[in-house]
Amino acid sequence: GDSVTQMEGPVTLSEEAFLTINCTYTATGYPSLFWYVQYPGEGLQLLLKATKADDKGSNKGFEATYRKETTSFHLEKGSVQVSDSAVYFCALSDRQAAGNKLTFGGGTRVLVKP
Amino acid sequence: DAGVIQSPRHEVTEMGQEVTLRCKPISGHNSLFWYRQTMMRGLELLIYFNNNVPIDDSGMPEDRFSAKMPNASFSTLKIQPSEPRDSAVYFCASSFAQQASNQPQHFGDGTRLSIL
C-alpha cells in the first residue's frame, strides 16, 4: 500500500535559519503530493502541492519539488520566522482511488525561536 | 467562502454517554473524511465518503463508532458509549474528487473531545 515517511521532530531552529523537512513516499500509482501545515489549535491547511514529476510547489516562502527518481518531496524554506512554528505533514493522493483519499506522514513539529 | 464547519468545537462528557460530532462540508465538494488526532497515534483516517456513500471505514476503531452522511451537506460521527480513550481532536475534511483529480482536502477546525 501507499506510505509516507517524514523525518521525526521536533526541529528547533533560530529565526532566519534554513529549514528542510525530508519526506519520502511509496506509492503503487502516480500520486499527487502535498504539504499541509497545522498551527496550534487549528486544523490542517494546505501549504503547497505538486502533481507531476519535477513540478515545484511553492507558497509563503516554502518550496518542494516532486522527485520521482528518488520518490521524495522535501520541504524547504530559506529564512524561517517565529510564525512558522507549527506541525508540517507530507501527504500523497492516489489519483486512481475513489474520493481523493490522502495518505499522511507522521508530521514534523517545527519550533522557531527568536 | 465558508470552509468546513464542525460542531461543537469542544465537548466534555462522562464516559458511557453518547457523543455526536457534526460536519458541514464545503458546498460542491463530494468527498468527506473523518480523522482523529492524538499525541500517541497521530492523525488517523477513520472513514470517508464519496457522493454520500461510505468508501472505506477500515479506520473506525470499533462498533462503538458510527458515521453517516444523509446528504451532501451534512455528516455525523457518533460514539456510543464513549470511553476515556476516545478523547482526541476529531477533524472533518472535504474535497472535490473526480477520476484522476489532484484536488486537496480542506479541513475544519476540529472538535476537541474529552471523555471523563
Image (cartoon, coloured by chain):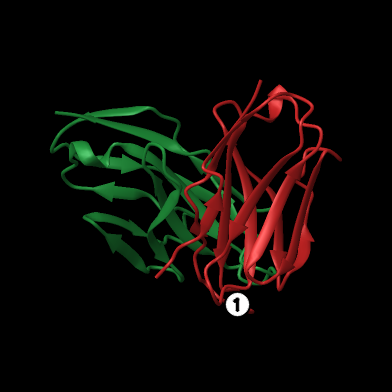
Q: Is residue B61 visible?
A: yes
Secondary structure found at label 1: loop
Q: Colour of chain A?
A: green
- Quarter holding the C terminus of chain B? top right
On screen, residue B86 versus residue B92, left or right, reads right
Residue A101 falls in image quadrant? bottom right
Residue A97 falls in image quadrant? bottom right
Image location (x, y in percent) of residue B13:
66, 28
Residue A96 falls in image quadrant? bottom right
* Residue plotted at (62% across, 78% down): B98
Count all numbered tags in the image, as a single digit. Answer: 1
Q: Return the residue found at the far top.
A: B116
How would you rate the neighbour count of disc 1 (Cα within 10 Å): few for under 14, some for 14-19, many for 20 or more?
some
Q: In the picture shown, does residue A71 fall above or below B49? A: above
Q: In the picture shown, does residue B50 fall above or below A15? A: below
Q: Return the residue found at the far right.
A: B63
Image location (x, y in percent) of residue B37:
57, 37
Q: Colour of chain B?
A: red
Q: State the residue in front, A16 or A82.
A: A82
Q: State the residue in front, A16 or B109.
A: B109
* Residue plotted at (63% across, 52% down): B22
Q: Is residue B43 visible?
A: no
Image location (x, y in percent) of residue A64:
34, 57
Q: Amino acid at mark 1?
A: Ala
On screen, residue B12 versus residue B78, left or right, reads left
Q: Which residue is mark 1?
A: B100
- Quarter holding the N terminus of chain B? bottom left
Q: Chain of mark 1?
A: B
On screen, residue A35 versus residue A59, left or right, reads right
